[in-house]
Amino acid sequence: MSQKAFHGSAERFYTKLGITHVIQPFEDGLRTDPAQPGSYEWWYFDAHLEDGSSLVVTFFTKDAAAPRTGLAPVIALDLDLPDGRRINTSATFDPADFSASTDACDVRIAGNRFAGDLHRYTIDVTLEDVSAQVTLVGETEPWRPGTGYTYYGEDEKRDFAWLPSVPLRERRRDLPGR
């Protein structure tokens, strides 16, 4: 049986969520209760680097494949190098090692940090013998589709929210001869 699903773009959803059409820093902070079974959040970065590498770093409140658990912070780091080597590592941490601001993006897990202000972000992570220090500066404004929330079910109690705080601005590349 199919369920109703829709983007929360009507004004009533902005009011319900306490947001406006202008994205505010608190929207990139902790928005759920990570101890609550059935909910989870993550802060995610991915990039193709100038040397041909690609890097993905994700801070989770819990394993996304096990959202019914309580707080169980996870950090994942995936690095694909130009020579074909792949480094994929992750670690689960004690809940006592997790903190996250509700005012802005400032997530800390056991000495690792993912923090930013909707324009400039710093990510410092060390897992086993791999570490990454990233500074990300936005070239365009943060974006979200409507409120960023998609609601499911007739009662609108289940949702999924998304906020690309530093979206990629596509760069035009001139073709030869232009």
Image (spheres, rainbow, N blue to C red):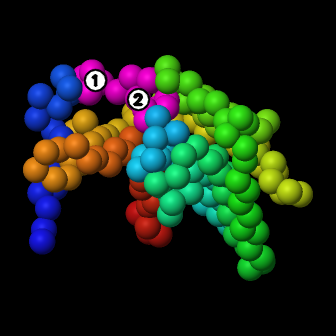
**Coordinates of residue 86 in the picture (x, y in percent):** 74, 73
Cβ atoms at labels 1 and 2 below 8 Å apart:
yes
Residue 123 quadrant: top right
Task: Please tell me how crowded label 2 is: few (under 14), some (14-19), or many (20+) other residues with Cα within 10 Å.
Answer: many
Q: Residue at x 62, y 48 (%)?
A: 72
Mark 2 falls on what kind of element?
helix
Q: Would residue 20 be found to the left or right of residue 119 on screen?
A: left
Q: Residue at x 18, y 23 (%)?
A: 15
Q: Amino acid at mark 1?
A: Ile
Q: Main secondary structure of the magenta part?
A: loop
Q: Residue at x 55, y 30 (%)?
A: 105
Q: Earlier in the sequence, mark 1 or mark 2?
A: 1
Q: Would residue 61 be found to the left or right of residue 4 on screen?
A: right
In the rendered image, residue 28 lying in the magenta stretch gets the answer yes
Task: Please tell me how crowded label 1 is: few (under 14), some (14-19), or many (20+) other residues with Cα within 10 Å.
Answer: some
Residue under label 2: 27
> Which of the two residues, 121 or 94, is positioned nearer the viewer here?
94
Q: Amino acid at mark 2?
A: Glu
> Which of the two residues, 44 or 98, is positioned nearer the viewer here?
98
> Which of the two residues, 104 or 177, is positioned nearer the viewer here?
104
**Coordinates of residue 164 in the picture (x, y in percent):** 42, 43
> Which of the two residues, 13 or 63, is positioned nearer the viewer here?
63
Q: Residue at x 47, y 55 (%)?
A: 67
Mark linked to residue 19: 1
Asked whether residue 152 is in view, the answer is yes
* Magenta residue span: 17-32
**Coordinates of residue 39 in the picture (x, y in percent):** 42, 46
Residue 96 quadrant: top right
Mark 1 falls on what kind of element?
loop
